[in-house]
Image (tube, rainbow, N blue to C red):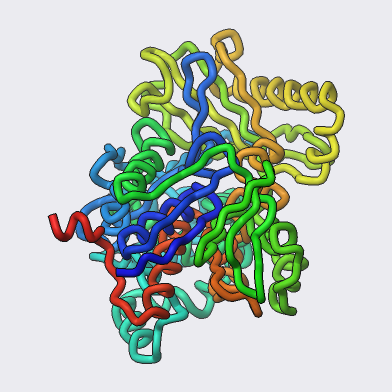
Amino acid sequence: MTNKSIIIIGAGLAGLSTGCYSQMNGYQTQIFEHHATPGGVATCWKRKGYTIDGGIHFLMCHRPGQSIYELYRELGTAQSNRFLDMTSYCRFIDEASGRSVQITKDLDLLAKELKAISPADSRIIDDLIAGARAMQGTDRGDMGMSQPQELLGCLEKVKQMWKMRGFFKYFTGRYARSAADYGKAIHDPWLRYIIENMFLPEVPIWFNLMLLGLLADGQLASLEGGSLNFVLPIEKHYRNLGGQITYGAAVEKILVENDRAVGVRLNDGSEHRADIVVSAADGYSTIYKMLDGRYVDGEIENRYKNWKLTRPLIMISLGVAREFKGEPDMNTIKLEHPFTTGSKDVNGISVRIFNYTDRLAPPGKTVVQVMFETEWDWWNELQKDRPGYEAEKKRGADQVLERLEAHYPGISSQVEMIDVATPCTWWRYTRNFRGAYMGWLMSSEIINAQIKKTLPGLGNFYMAGQWVTSGGGVVSSLYSGRHVVQILCHGEGKEFSAVSHALASG
């Protein structure tokens, strides 16, 4: 057993995962987190008795028998949560035509309803449904993520491809094209809008097929009580394994001696030493601020200059003294009359309904949460004018309520709480570069990229989290922390363990 020490920057999902697996493998770790609570993007906060959850929209593969479920179990969160099965992914509403369609787990019904929208697109609809069915099956959920690519030899890669043989063709050819590009062949504009906006227009169409397959298999879930209920058991598990966390501790610099990371300096001036440093914090801040841009190459520079980021969001949460029985949990509304925030027109909004069964609102009441894309520069500049910033937040909430009134008559008079989170809110909670809550945009060009977890010329240093994965989200963030520890163990010639030594011996 090693007695090496590790400092981990950030107590988001990646940082907590790194901490848990490090402790399981005999390392002694200390996490420094700038915020007062764990979770990073996967967080919640309270307003007037309502819980505002801006984090995890859904979880994949929450049932036993899946590799991803084992990941949750190893981290202590599968045993501590009640997962709420999703039978519907989203309802799409077109205000101009009055048409709507609900994406449910019944693929036969979905095919029928999509063909009713556009019989001329039957061939494409059949293609989509066939892809979704191919994505169904047993334990295809880790999608090749259980092992770090850095440690995979040719034989291991062949084994991965064999395991995915039933649906491997859907990761190539026309299915590797973006949803927007794939949608160009669709005749009906409304159907095209649905396909493009099922997740993001830039994601490869196979990602949409995977979501439909998981939904049909009963392998998509929401969380009772919100995102923090998923995070806190991991934090507890980490502490039970002997890990330490310091909150309200912002790392200012990573200490380097002879091109080897040796510790960190906090913004209070205190210095803390360790054998290894892992940053699970924002990538840009880590590389260009904590390390002053000293350890970069052309590949890294190109990435941070030219790669597209997840577009920032406005999130308006309303505490409503009303129940919304029978309403889908998730709705995407294409607006007949767009509105403007900053210099950006808002043509569509997503509306999440958190009923009492979600344990985010008091009995008989509901959290109605509206999200739409916005811009970083405009909000970042506006926040310097605090009265103007607050006035624009109020204007956005008023415009949203006006639109919601058409779908939920009377809602304006039933609102007891309004909370508006801007890209600056995400920055305050997570320090994510330009408010990109999921890091790099999951485009068809980026999603298959391999990003190193080390920096050129810097020893004893690793990175975890969404800035070293090609798609943000719960699973990739958790796996990234696991991967760092697998790489550490491999470098020391020791076998990686996903069970703590104390638990194994007890």
From the image, which quarter does the N terminus lie in? Answer: bottom left
Say how many tags the image has.
Answer: 0
Task: Judge whether residue 108 can be spotted in this image.
Answer: no
Q: Residue at x 50, y 72 (%)?
A: 175
Question: Could you say where residue 483 lies in the image, as x and y percent from the top left?
Answer: 42, 68
- Picture quarter containing residue 469? bottom right
The residue positioned 65% from the left and 32% from the top of the image is 421
Where in the figure is residue 351, as x and y percent of width and height?
54, 33
**Which quadrant of the rendered structure holds the C terminus?**
bottom left
The residue lying at 54 percent from left, 68 percent from top is 462
**237 with respect to 8 (left or right):** left
Say whether residue 443 is visible: yes
Give the quadrant of residue 350. Answer: top right
Residue 290 versus residue 218 in the image, above or below: below
- Across and down, in percent, residue 98 comes to 57, 34
Drawn side of residue 119 relative to residue 62, left or right: right
Residue found at x 85% / y 33%: 384
Along the line of sight, which residue is nearer the eye, 273 or 38? 273
Q: Is residue 298 above or below residue 351?
A: below
The residue closer to the viewer here, 430 or 118, is 430
